[in-house]
């Protein structure tokens, strides 16, 4: 005896077959259109995330394109001598010739740099944070968080990659100029003398930084070195800092230093 189900199937055979075909087509379409993870925004390649690992780069926000980076290192004693002697970073880092101010995405046209771009909150690897503190004493006042919000987020880099590259570049420039600045503490010098020292350390590197001077508390009208800024191309992986640049080629030059200037004496 035929069951009601068999009778139904015989009666509606064509409709059942059509429904099965439509369902199969929909399932196939969704399997193609729904990948497990979205493709990487920069390369278009499918990436498989690793547990506990952050990606090296983010897609920069719209309108945040830039041409190169400036690594800014502060002449730390001059910074502290300008009425900041009681700040924690000045009390605890006496004798450091250069300190990290920041790594800034820049455009060729001065003062048009991108800033305050949308970015995840700063979440540095603990080991990197400890190493960074040695060359960035301003971390005691939250400088690293400020720099990430205003500048680092515009790089498109993961925060660990951004600050690791900042640290590597700062160590190299500090090795180039730090000893000479310590020797010159309390004395006058010139841009030519500092560049000659740098070129002895690595030929051609003297053209990759600019010197910035102004008067500070206690210096009278004598300009003192307050900052060294190095020009670096953004030709590294994912837009990271890569090749050192001749600063003149990206329209950057010394400011306020004149024929000679003073290196503020290091605090003992």
Image: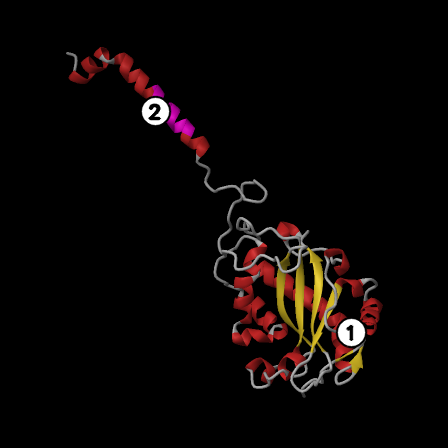
The image's colour scheme reads: secondary structure
Q: Quadrant of residue 137?
A: bottom right
Quarter of the picture holding the N terminus: top left
Measuring 35% from the left and 19% from the top, which residue is drawn there?
21
Q: Is residue 181 left or right of residue 113?
A: right
Asked if the residue at tag 1 contacts the one at tag 2, i.e. Cβ–Cβ closer than 8 Å, the answer is no
Part of the protein shown in magenta? 21-29
- Image position, residue 66 (x, y; %): 63, 53
Examine the rendered structure and indicate whether residue 130 appears above or below residue 153: below
* Mark in the foreground, 2 or 1: 1
Give the crowd class for mark 1: few <14, some 14-19, many >=20 residues within 10 Å. few
Q: Earlier in the sequence, mark 2 or mark 1?
A: 2
- Image position, residue 227 (x, y; %): 68, 72
- Image position, residue 205 (x, y; %): 79, 63
Examine the rendered structure and indicate whether residue 199 appears above or below residue 53: below
Secondary structure, mark 1, is loop
Magenta stretch containing residue 267, yes or no?
A: no
| Viewer-nearest residue: 253 or 46 | 253
Residues at marks 2 and 1, CA–CA distance in whole angstroms = 79 Å
Q: Is residue 5 left or right of residue 198?
A: left
Measuring 72% from the left and 61% from the top, which residue is drawn there?
252
Quarter of the picture holding the C terminus: bottom right
Give the crowd class for mark 2: few <14, some 14-19, many >=20 residues within 10 Å. few
Secondary structure, mark 2, is helix
Which mark identifies residue 159?
none
Which mark identifies residue 258?
1
Measuring 84% from the left and 63% from the top, which residue is drawn there?
203
Name the residue tied to disc 2.
23
Main SS type for the magenta part?
helix
- Image position, residue 247 (x, y; %): 75, 60
Numbered disc total: 2
């Amino acid at each position: 005896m035929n069951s009601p189900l068999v009778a139904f199937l015989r009666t509606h055979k064509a409709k059942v077959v059509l429904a099965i075909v439509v369902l199969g087509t929909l399932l196939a379409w969704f399997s193609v259109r729904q990948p497990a993870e979205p493709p990487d925004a920069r390369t278009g390649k499918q990436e498989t995330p690793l547990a506990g690992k952050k990606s090296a780069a983010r897609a920069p926000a719209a309108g945040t394109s830039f041409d190169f980076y400036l690594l800014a290192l502060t002449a730390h004693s001059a910074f502290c001598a300008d009425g900041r002697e009681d700040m924690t970073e000045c009390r605890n880092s006496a004798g450091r010739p250069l300190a990290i101010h920041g790594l800034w995405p820049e455009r060729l046209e001065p003062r048009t740099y991108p800033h305050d771009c949308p970015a995840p909150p700063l979440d540095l690897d603990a080991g990197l944070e400890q190493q960074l503190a040695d060359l960035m004493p301003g971390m005691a006042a939250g400088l690293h968080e400020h720099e990430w919000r205003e500048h680092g987020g515009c790089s498109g880099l993961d925060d660990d990659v951004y600050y690791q590259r900042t640290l590597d570049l700062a160590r190299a420039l500090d090795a180039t100029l730090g000893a000479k600045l310590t020797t010159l503490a309390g004395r006058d010098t010139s841009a030519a003398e500092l560049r000659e020292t740098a070129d002895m350390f690595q030929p051609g590197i003297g053209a990759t930084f600019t010197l910035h001077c102004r008067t500070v508390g206690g210096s009278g009208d004598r300009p003192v070195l307050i900052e060294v800024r190095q020009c670096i191309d953004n030709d590294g992986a994912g837009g990271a800092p890569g090749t050192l640049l001749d600063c003149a080629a990206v329209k950057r030059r010394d400011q306020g230093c004149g024929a000679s200037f003073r290196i503020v004496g290091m605090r003992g």
